Each structure stands twice: as structure tokens, then as C-alpha cells.
Image (cartoon, grey):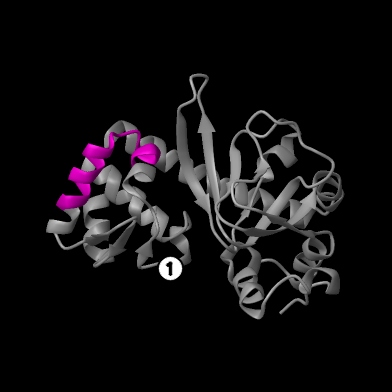
Amino acid sequence: MTTLPASVAAHFSEQDKRTLFANRWFASLSGSQQKALLDASRAIRLSEGQLFASQGQALRKKRDGFGVLVSGLLKVSSTSTDGREAILSFVRPGQWFGELSVLDGTSRERDFLSVGISEILVIESEAMQSLLQDVQLSHQITRLLASRTRMLLNLVESFTLRSSLSRTARRLVMLAYDDEPESGQHRSTLDVSQDALASMLGMTRQSVASQLRQLSDRGAISQAYGSVKISSMVALMAEAA
């Protein structure tokens, strides 16, 4: 395992470090590529409700760039001109994010807001541009971006071609796999409210409640306040398909 720089390692527990290196994309990098990213990073802490970056905001020279969430939770959302919020996804520990604006130099396309206290390793934009001179690392970043694009295309397909029940099941599957279904590992309990699911799916809360009841009746999930427990991933994926 690549060693964290001393200036960074002091901020994190052993579990935090294991989470970082367990990420499928990061684990696929060579040791030298991992070291290059970690050596160029610095640790920042966000408090409850603090933004890492906001929609329409230009990249800042400090505190902004390509990052990985080490602990906590980030909500990724977009807000319309009339103040309505659409939750797009959540960034969970071990996931890298923010590559799009770093690659094309444009403003942030979404809000990244901390839910609770979040610890992040961030590689500032200028430092990341220097690292991207390495063709092999640049290829790996492109591969990450391609995976995200594939996920977004799947979401667009769901909105246009699938029933409400299938869309709901599909989104739960994606949440369980942290939007990385190829990883083969999923969480059995999803800390997501019906309101958040409604925002993600573009449905009313009442409609989402109805879809969740159907999935529960079919043995795919069970519900608790503010969370969904996956009873059978096989059944849930059957409904998603």
C-alpha cells in the first residue's frame, strides 16, 4: 500500500486510510500514480452545511480542485432559478470527485455540500494540471470520467424509458453500489430519506412512497425512518431491469 504523506496521514484514522485505498478506481492505479496524487494533496475539513464548491463558481486557486472524500458525506445537488433543489447523488468515503471542472477549466456544475463533518484530500487545480502532463495518469482520469458518463447515460435512459417502479429500484441499486456497480460490493442499508429519493428521481414524495411499498411487498427492501434496507439485491435488480 502506498504510504500517505506525513502531513496528510496525521489527519486520518487507520479506517479512513483503508477506505481511501479500497476505492476501486484508486486501487487500479500504479503505486507511482497513487503516490503522485497523494503527495500533491492536502487535507481540509468541512463543517455541517459548508460548501466544498458551489454551482457556477469558478475554480479557486485554494481549497478547490480534484478531491477524494475520506470521511463524512457530500451532497451533490443543483438549484433552479426559483430555488428548487435537485439532489443528483452523494459522494461517500473513498470516492473521488470534481474532475470535470479541473479538466476543462470551467465553473463548477453542481453544489458539493457537506452533510455533517467531512474530511477531504484535495489536489488544487494548478497542481492537478501539472500531474496531468503524465500521459498514463491522464488516461486514468479519462477512464474515471468515462465511467461517470456511462452512469449519467443510464440515468437518462431510466427517465425516458422506464416505469416509476423500475426507476426507483434502479436508483436504489446505484446508491447501494455508490454509483459504481462494477465494484461488486454493495451496502445493505441506505441512509436516504423519501424526500431525497423524490428529489433524485423527479417524483413526488407520495409517488416514491408508493414505489417503495411495492418493492417492500415484493421482498426487495424493507423501510425504516430515513433509511432503506436491501433485503434481496437479486429481487431489487430484477425490478430495476
Which residue does the image show at 70% across and 31% down from the upper left?
57
Estimate the x, y position of residue 71 in percent, counting from the top left: 61, 64
Viewer-side residue, 227 vs 142: 227
| Numbered disc total | 1
Identify the image quadrant of the N terminus. bottom right
Up-down: is 65 above or below 29? above
Residue 220 as seen in the image, left or right of residue 1 = left
Up-down: is 51 above or below 106? below
Estimate the x, y position of residue 103 in percent, counting from the top left: 73, 40
**Residue at disc 1, secondary structure:** loop
Majority SS type along the magenta span: helix
Estimate the x, y position of residue 198 in percent, counting from the top left: 33, 39
Residue 26 as seen in the image, left or right of residue 192 = right
Residue 208 as seen in the image, left or right of residue 140 = left
Query: Residue at label 1?
Result: 184
Which residue does the image show at 80% across and 38% down from the upper left?
60
